[in-house]
Image (cartoon, rainbow, N blue to C red):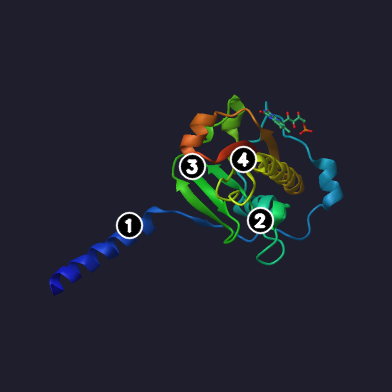
Amino acid sequence: MKRFFKFFAGVTALTLFSVSAAVADIRLPDPQTEGGIGLFQALKERASAPGGDFPTAPLSMEELSTILWAATGLNRGDQGWTVPMANGLPPYVDIYAALDSGVFKYDWGSNSLIEVSKEDIRGNIGSQNFVAQASCSLILVSSEEGLAKVNDELKKQFAHVAAGAMTQDIYLASAALHVGARYIHSLKYPETRSALGIPDGDEIICLMILGK
Ligand SMILES: Cc1cc2nc3c(=O)[nH]c(=O)nc-3n(C[C@H](O)[C@H](O)[C@H](O)COP(=O)(O)O)c2cc1C
Protein backbone atom coordinates (compact mmCIF):
# COMPACT_ATOMS: atom_id res chain seq x y z
CA MET A 1 0.00 0.00 0.00
CA LYS A 2 2.85 2.34 1.00
CA ARG A 3 4.51 1.64 -2.31
CA PHE A 4 1.27 2.47 -4.16
CA PHE A 5 1.04 5.87 -2.42
CA LYS A 6 4.67 6.60 -3.25
CA PHE A 7 3.98 5.73 -6.89
CA PHE A 8 0.76 7.78 -6.90
CA ALA A 9 2.51 10.82 -5.36
CA GLY A 10 5.31 10.48 -7.91
CA VAL A 11 2.90 10.39 -10.85
CA THR A 12 0.93 13.37 -9.47
CA ALA A 13 4.11 15.42 -9.01
CA LEU A 14 5.26 14.53 -12.52
CA THR A 15 1.88 15.47 -13.99
CA LEU A 16 1.82 18.80 -12.14
CA PHE A 17 5.37 19.53 -13.23
CA SER A 18 4.66 18.77 -16.87
CA VAL A 19 1.45 20.89 -16.81
CA SER A 20 3.23 23.90 -15.32
CA ALA A 21 6.25 23.42 -17.58
CA ALA A 22 4.03 23.25 -20.68
CA VAL A 23 2.19 26.52 -20.08
CA ALA A 24 3.99 29.77 -20.74
CA ASP A 25 1.84 32.51 -19.24
CA ILE A 26 3.42 35.97 -19.31
CA ARG A 27 3.41 38.33 -16.33
CA LEU A 28 3.27 41.74 -17.99
CA PRO A 29 5.40 44.64 -16.77
CA ASP A 30 3.44 47.43 -15.08
CA PRO A 31 1.66 49.61 -17.63
CA GLN A 32 2.70 53.22 -18.12
CA THR A 33 0.06 55.29 -16.30
CA GLU A 34 1.81 58.65 -16.06
CA GLY A 35 3.53 61.13 -18.35
CA GLY A 36 3.24 60.78 -22.10
CA ILE A 37 1.92 63.24 -24.64
CA GLY A 38 -1.35 64.15 -22.90
CA LEU A 39 -4.95 63.35 -23.81
CA PHE A 40 -5.55 66.26 -26.17
CA GLN A 41 -2.41 65.59 -28.16
CA ALA A 42 -3.35 61.88 -28.32
CA LEU A 43 -6.79 62.85 -29.65
CA LYS A 44 -5.10 65.01 -32.28
CA GLU A 45 -2.79 62.15 -33.28
CA ARG A 46 -5.33 59.28 -33.24
CA ALA A 47 -5.45 57.70 -36.69
CA SER A 48 -5.40 54.29 -38.30
CA ALA A 49 -1.96 53.27 -39.54
CA PRO A 50 -2.24 52.69 -43.30
CA GLY A 51 -3.00 49.07 -44.17
CA GLY A 52 -0.82 49.08 -47.30
CA ASP A 53 2.28 50.06 -45.36
CA PHE A 54 1.46 48.67 -41.93
CA PRO A 55 4.41 48.90 -39.49
CA THR A 56 5.93 45.50 -38.77
CA ALA A 57 8.32 45.95 -35.81
CA PRO A 58 7.25 44.36 -32.51
CA LEU A 59 6.05 46.30 -29.47
CA SER A 60 7.88 46.03 -26.17
CA MET A 61 6.05 44.14 -23.41
CA GLU A 62 5.63 47.46 -21.56
CA GLU A 63 3.95 49.02 -24.60
CA LEU A 64 1.65 46.00 -24.95
CA SER A 65 0.88 46.12 -21.23
CA THR A 66 0.02 49.83 -21.47
CA ILE A 67 -2.27 49.33 -24.47
CA LEU A 68 -4.06 46.39 -22.81
CA TRP A 69 -4.42 48.39 -19.60
CA ALA A 70 -5.93 51.27 -21.58
CA ALA A 71 -8.39 48.81 -23.15
CA THR A 72 -9.71 47.14 -19.98
CA GLY A 73 -7.28 47.62 -17.12
CA LEU A 74 -8.20 48.28 -13.51
CA ASN A 75 -7.91 52.00 -12.78
CA ARG A 76 -9.56 52.32 -9.33
CA GLY A 77 -8.47 49.57 -6.98
CA ASP A 78 -10.00 46.17 -7.67
CA GLN A 79 -13.45 47.28 -8.97
CA GLY A 80 -13.27 49.92 -11.67
CA TRP A 81 -11.91 49.81 -15.22
CA THR A 82 -10.64 52.22 -17.88
CA VAL A 83 -13.83 51.62 -19.92
CA PRO A 84 -17.43 51.75 -18.65
CA MET A 85 -19.25 48.43 -18.35
CA ALA A 86 -23.03 48.08 -17.90
CA ASN A 87 -24.16 47.73 -14.28
CA GLY A 88 -20.53 48.05 -13.19
CA LEU A 89 -19.90 44.47 -14.30
CA PRO A 90 -16.34 43.28 -14.80
CA PRO A 91 -15.30 43.54 -18.49
CA TYR A 92 -17.49 41.23 -20.61
CA VAL A 93 -15.42 41.68 -23.76
CA ASP A 94 -12.25 39.62 -23.58
CA ILE A 95 -9.01 40.49 -25.34
CA TYR A 96 -6.87 37.82 -26.94
CA ALA A 97 -3.37 38.74 -28.13
CA ALA A 98 -1.98 36.89 -31.14
CA LEU A 99 1.82 37.13 -31.01
CA ASP A 100 4.62 35.25 -32.76
CA SER A 101 4.96 33.09 -29.64
CA GLY A 102 1.29 32.07 -29.53
CA VAL A 103 -2.17 33.18 -28.49
CA PHE A 104 -2.82 34.64 -25.04
CA LYS A 105 -5.85 35.92 -23.14
CA TYR A 106 -5.42 39.20 -21.22
CA ASP A 107 -6.15 38.81 -17.53
CA TRP A 108 -6.67 42.34 -16.21
CA GLY A 109 -6.79 41.09 -12.60
CA SER A 110 -3.23 39.78 -12.59
CA ASN A 111 -1.94 41.96 -15.45
CA SER A 112 -0.91 38.79 -17.25
CA LEU A 113 -1.25 37.07 -20.58
CA ILE A 114 -2.66 33.59 -20.11
CA GLU A 115 -1.48 31.17 -22.76
CA VAL A 116 -4.22 29.74 -24.96
CA SER A 117 -1.97 28.07 -27.53
CA LYS A 118 1.57 28.15 -28.81
CA GLU A 119 0.40 28.56 -32.41
CA ASP A 120 1.28 31.66 -34.44
CA ILE A 121 -2.14 32.44 -35.94
CA ARG A 122 -1.39 35.99 -37.14
CA GLY A 123 -1.21 34.94 -40.79
CA ASN A 124 -4.61 33.27 -40.82
CA ILE A 125 -7.06 35.62 -39.10
CA GLY A 126 -7.42 38.65 -41.39
CA SER A 127 -9.02 38.69 -44.84
CA GLN A 128 -6.62 41.44 -45.97
CA ASN A 129 -3.02 40.40 -46.62
CA PHE A 130 -1.41 43.19 -44.58
CA VAL A 131 -3.05 41.92 -41.36
CA ALA A 132 -0.51 39.07 -41.36
CA GLN A 133 2.34 41.63 -41.11
CA ALA A 134 1.20 43.05 -37.78
CA SER A 135 3.48 41.99 -34.95
CA CYS A 136 0.48 41.77 -32.62
CA SER A 137 -3.22 41.38 -33.27
CA LEU A 138 -5.64 42.00 -30.44
CA ILE A 139 -8.88 40.04 -30.90
CA LEU A 140 -11.93 41.37 -29.05
CA VAL A 141 -14.45 38.69 -28.11
CA SER A 142 -17.73 39.15 -26.25
CA SER A 143 -17.96 36.68 -23.42
CA GLU A 144 -21.21 34.75 -22.90
CA GLU A 145 -20.13 34.05 -19.33
CA GLY A 146 -19.32 37.70 -18.66
CA LEU A 147 -22.73 38.75 -20.04
CA ALA A 148 -24.68 36.08 -18.13
CA LYS A 149 -26.40 38.68 -15.89
CA VAL A 150 -27.45 40.90 -18.83
CA ASN A 151 -30.88 40.55 -20.53
CA ASP A 152 -30.62 38.53 -23.74
CA GLU A 153 -31.86 41.37 -25.97
CA LEU A 154 -29.19 43.75 -24.59
CA LYS A 155 -26.14 41.46 -24.63
CA LYS A 156 -24.99 42.25 -28.17
CA GLN A 157 -25.60 45.98 -27.81
CA PHE A 158 -23.67 46.17 -24.54
CA ALA A 159 -20.77 44.12 -25.92
CA HIS A 160 -20.48 46.32 -29.00
CA VAL A 161 -20.62 49.54 -26.96
CA ALA A 162 -17.81 48.14 -24.79
CA ALA A 163 -15.76 47.15 -27.84
CA GLY A 164 -16.17 50.69 -29.22
CA ALA A 165 -14.83 52.21 -26.01
CA MET A 166 -12.03 49.65 -25.84
CA THR A 167 -10.90 50.16 -29.42
CA GLN A 168 -10.87 53.93 -29.00
CA ASP A 169 -8.74 53.55 -25.85
CA ILE A 170 -6.40 51.28 -27.83
CA TYR A 171 -6.14 53.92 -30.56
CA LEU A 172 -5.41 56.68 -28.03
CA ALA A 173 -2.83 54.70 -26.05
CA SER A 174 -1.19 53.67 -29.33
CA ALA A 175 -1.04 57.29 -30.46
CA ALA A 176 0.57 58.25 -27.13
CA LEU A 177 3.18 55.49 -27.53
CA HIS A 178 3.74 56.10 -31.27
CA VAL A 179 2.52 52.58 -32.03
CA GLY A 180 0.62 51.97 -35.27
CA ALA A 181 -2.93 50.65 -34.80
CA ARG A 182 -5.84 49.78 -37.10
CA TYR A 183 -9.37 48.49 -36.46
CA ILE A 184 -10.11 45.45 -38.61
CA HIS A 185 -13.58 44.06 -39.19
CA SER A 186 -12.74 41.91 -42.24
CA LEU A 187 -11.50 38.76 -40.62
CA LYS A 188 -11.68 35.02 -41.11
CA TYR A 189 -14.29 34.25 -38.47
CA PRO A 190 -14.35 30.40 -38.55
CA GLU A 191 -10.53 30.14 -38.59
CA THR A 192 -10.15 32.70 -35.80
CA ARG A 193 -12.86 31.06 -33.70
CA SER A 194 -11.27 27.65 -33.98
CA ALA A 195 -7.79 29.04 -33.24
CA LEU A 196 -9.09 30.67 -30.05
CA GLY A 197 -11.13 27.64 -29.00
CA ILE A 198 -13.86 29.90 -27.58
CA PRO A 199 -17.29 28.63 -26.48
CA ASP A 200 -20.18 28.78 -29.01
CA GLY A 201 -21.84 31.68 -27.16
CA ASP A 202 -18.77 33.93 -27.40
CA GLU A 203 -18.72 36.33 -30.37
CA ILE A 204 -15.65 37.65 -32.16
CA ILE A 205 -16.16 41.39 -32.63
CA CYS A 206 -13.02 42.75 -34.31
CA LEU A 207 -9.24 42.91 -34.43
CA MET A 208 -6.97 45.77 -33.49
CA ILE A 209 -3.68 45.23 -35.27
CA LEU A 210 -0.57 46.81 -33.76
CA GLY A 211 2.99 47.42 -34.91
CA LYS A 212 5.86 49.90 -34.81
C1 LIG B 1 -16.27 49.47 -37.64
C2 LIG B 1 -14.97 49.62 -38.39
C3 LIG B 1 -14.58 48.60 -39.24
C4 LIG B 1 -13.33 48.69 -39.90
N1 LIG B 1 -12.92 47.62 -40.64
C5 LIG B 1 -11.74 47.71 -41.31
C6 LIG B 1 -11.28 46.61 -42.07
O1 LIG B 1 -11.87 45.53 -42.09
N2 LIG B 1 -10.12 46.76 -42.75
C7 LIG B 1 -9.39 47.92 -42.71
O2 LIG B 1 -8.35 47.98 -43.35
N3 LIG B 1 -9.79 48.96 -41.96
C8 LIG B 1 -10.95 48.90 -41.25
N4 LIG B 1 -11.35 49.93 -40.46
C9 LIG B 1 -10.51 51.14 -40.35
C10 LIG B 1 -11.16 52.29 -41.14
O3 LIG B 1 -11.00 52.07 -42.52
C11 LIG B 1 -10.52 53.60 -40.71
O4 LIG B 1 -10.82 53.83 -39.36
C12 LIG B 1 -11.09 54.74 -41.59
O5 LIG B 1 -10.52 54.69 -42.88
C13 LIG B 1 -10.86 56.09 -40.99
O6 LIG B 1 -9.46 56.31 -40.79
P1 LIG B 1 -8.91 56.82 -39.38
O7 LIG B 1 -9.14 55.72 -38.37
O8 LIG B 1 -7.47 57.07 -39.62
O9 LIG B 1 -9.67 58.04 -38.99
C14 LIG B 1 -12.54 49.85 -39.76
C15 LIG B 1 -12.95 50.86 -38.90
C16 LIG B 1 -14.13 50.75 -38.20
C17 LIG B 1 -14.50 51.83 -37.23
Residue 199 - label: 3
| Residue 17 versus residue 207 in the image, above or below | below
Q: Secondary structure at mark 4?
A: loop
Crowd band around label 1 with a 10 angstrom C-alpha radius: few (<14), some (14–19), many (20+) = few
Amino acid under label 4?
Answer: Ala
Q: Earlier in the sequence, mark 4 or mark 3?
A: 4
Amino acid under label 3?
Answer: Pro
Mark 4–mark 2 Cα distance, whole angstroms, equals 36 Å
Residue pointed to by mark 1: 18
Residue pointed to by mark 2: 89
Judged by depth in the image, the label closer to the viewer, 4 or 3, is 3
Mark 4–mark 1 Cα distance, whole angstroms, equals 33 Å
Judged by depth in the image, the label closer to the viewer, 4 or 2, is 2
Q: Specify whether 199 is left or right of 74.
A: left
Crowd band around label 4 with a 10 angstrom C-alpha radius: few (<14), some (14–19), many (20+) = some
80 or 122: nearer the viewer: 80
Task: Give the residue displayed 64% in from the left and 56% down from the top.
Answer: 90
